[in-house]
Image (cartoon, rainbow, N blue to C red):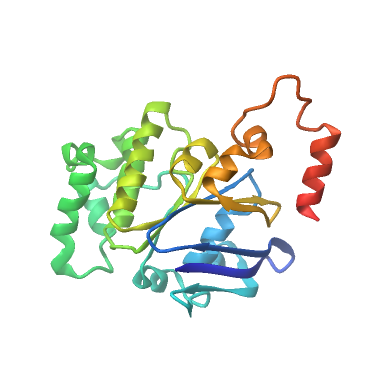
Amino acid sequence: MLAMENLEVVYEDVILVLKGISLSVPEGSIVALLGANGAGKTTVLRAITGLLDVHRGKITKGTITLDGKPIHHMDAPATVAAGIGQVMEGRRTFTEFTVDENLRIGAHTADRGTVEANLDRIYTLFPRLAERRKQVAGYLSGGEQQMCVIGRALMAEPRYLLLDEPSLGLAPLIVQQIRDLIVAINEQGTSVLLVEQNANMALAIASHGYVLETGKVVMDKPAAVLREDDDVREFYLGLREEGAASFRDVKHYKRRKRWLS
């Protein structure tokens, strides 16, 4: 299990971004992490994968463990070696390299004897990439670039895959394809922590979900329960009961204030 317990993160020694976060990703599961921009979702991923120092951030309290062993002291290469992969927001391909070269870069920590077998697995999982394996990544469509960076992360054979907004900026049909691919990856044995603003997609495939607000977990429930929650339906799924007042009405203001207290 990948777990975070009472974690606090500060940027530049003054900005408290995570305020005692606790969450867990059981082995074999998909867990959704929801929240508005600035809630702290990406910081959660950076803390897990050892990338906080790149952004002048540091953990000031709490622990992160993998199978009960602390990993919050590890740097990024060590977390990859431990079995954690991350796909960052923004489809960060190496634009001047081919698809095949991008994927091989992802295997830099893997046993050389497994590279070709892993490539075959990725091309089976992503047939579109197989068709474009010799094409320069910078000329791929947005959806193809997302497939490429997910495939690159899988080349290191992670047990846990952290995805940061994989559907961002993609057409609905491509979002559906990405959704199906995440499910397929999970069914092949990789646990997933999915950061998404597309709450409908995330909660449809996750077993459990967390909602962040200004650095705190304000909801921690099974995904099916979150999908039926009135606040989640209004604020994240865009579903509002007929005749309901705006987001800023007194009832919801008081409820959100209670969440954050």
Query: Which residue is painted at 63% across and 69% down in the image?
Result: 7
Location of residue 55 by image quarter: bottom right
Query: Which residue is painted at 30% across and 46% down in the image?
Result: 184
**Residue 118: image location, x then y, percent:** 19, 57
- Residue 94 appearing in the image: no
**Residue 171: image location, x then y, percent:** 42, 27
Report the number of discs. Answer: 0
Image position of 24 (left or right of 8): left
**Residue 54: image location, x then y, percent:** 53, 64
Quarter holding the N terminus is bottom left
**As drawn, 134 above or below 73:** above
Query: Which residue is painted at 36% across and 42% down in the image?
Result: 146
Question: Observer-nearest residue: 250 or 140?
Answer: 250
Image position of 114 (left or right of 164): left
Location of residue 238 by image quarter: top right
Quarter holding the C terminus is bottom right
- Residue 137 appearing in the image: yes
**As drawn, 157 above or below 249:** below
**Residue 114: image location, x then y, percent:** 16, 65
